[in-house]
Amino acid sequence: MCIRAYKDLAAQEGAVFAFNEKVVSITEGDGHVEVKTNKSCYTADYLIVTAGAFVKELMSSIHLPLPVTILRKTFAWYDSDERFSEQNFPCFSFELENATYYGFPSVNGTGLKIGRHDGGVVIDPNKDRDDFNLSDQEELDEFLHEYMPSIQNLKFGKTCMYDMTPDEDFIIDYFPGNDRIVLASGFSGHGFKFASAIGELLVDMTNKKDVNFDLSLFSLERFKNS
């Protein structure tokens, strides 16, 4: 629903979408940036790169190595009663000695959602991900048995990908030596909730407007000696 709303608003402002096109190269021309895909070629005054799990591969193609690790992550929904409804139960995070779990209440009867934030398996985003499996379920079941024993029946599970930075903070910065390219990545599993604010910030950066935030926490410079 959120993505559909973003898409609709962008279309109203004149955005044109080109789905299922793989970026082949990014080059800077005379006062513009050129993006070639497997289907077409695009030029623009400025480029914002928000390539998610594919950002490491894409930036390596233009000689910008990023300390980003792509992880397979899992989460699931479980049957739950009214105690765990959105009216009665909060979003939560459990920081244990050797693991961190997060979850959301049952919204409109969808069930309690739960996942593990840390851990994960390093993967190639170009290859098929393993589906949610019994091993993934057992990890969540163990947590629920200890802390929410009334939650027992799995409804279904899914997988996703994290583009994880070493410090779990975002990357929001200009491409080194080229302020026509703005990069936003490394959202480490918690970037979507900030999408509206980050989108506005990226537009201000490309338009060279004053940014009223200290972005040093998200700079590429912080990885210089790592």
Image: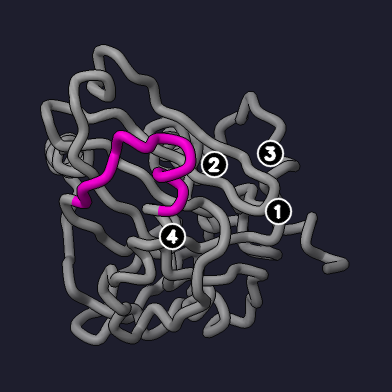
Q: CA distance from mark 1 to mark 2?
A: 23 Å
Question: Where does label 4 land, which residue?
Answer: 139
User: Closer to the observer: label 3 or label 4?
Assistant: 4
Question: Where does label 3 land, which residue?
Answer: 215
User: Closer to the observer: label 1 or label 2?
Assistant: 1
- Secondary structure under tag 4 reads helix
Q: CA distance from mark 1 to mark 4?
A: 24 Å
Q: Which amino acid type corresponds to the residue marked 2 in the rendered image?
A: Met
Is the C terminus in the top left, top right, bottom left or bottom right quadrant?
bottom right
Q: Earlier in the sequence, mark 1 or mark 4?
A: 4
In the foreground, 3 or 214 = 3
Q: Which amino acid type corresponds to the residue marked 3 in the rendered image?
A: Leu
Q: CA distance from mark 2 to mark 4?
A: 42 Å
Q: Is residue 149 shown in magenta?
A: yes
Question: Where does label 2 land, which residue?
Answer: 205
The residue at 37%/53% (across/down) is 141
Residue 31 appearing in the image? yes
In the foreground, 158 or 125 = 158
- Secondary structure under tag 2 reads helix
What crowding class fits label 4: few (fewer than 14 Cα within 10 Å), some (14-19), or many (20 or more)?
few
Q: CA distance from mark 3 to mark 4?
A: 36 Å
User: Closer to the observer: label 1 or label 4?
Assistant: 4
Apparent side of residue 156 relative to residue 51 in the rendered image (left or right): left
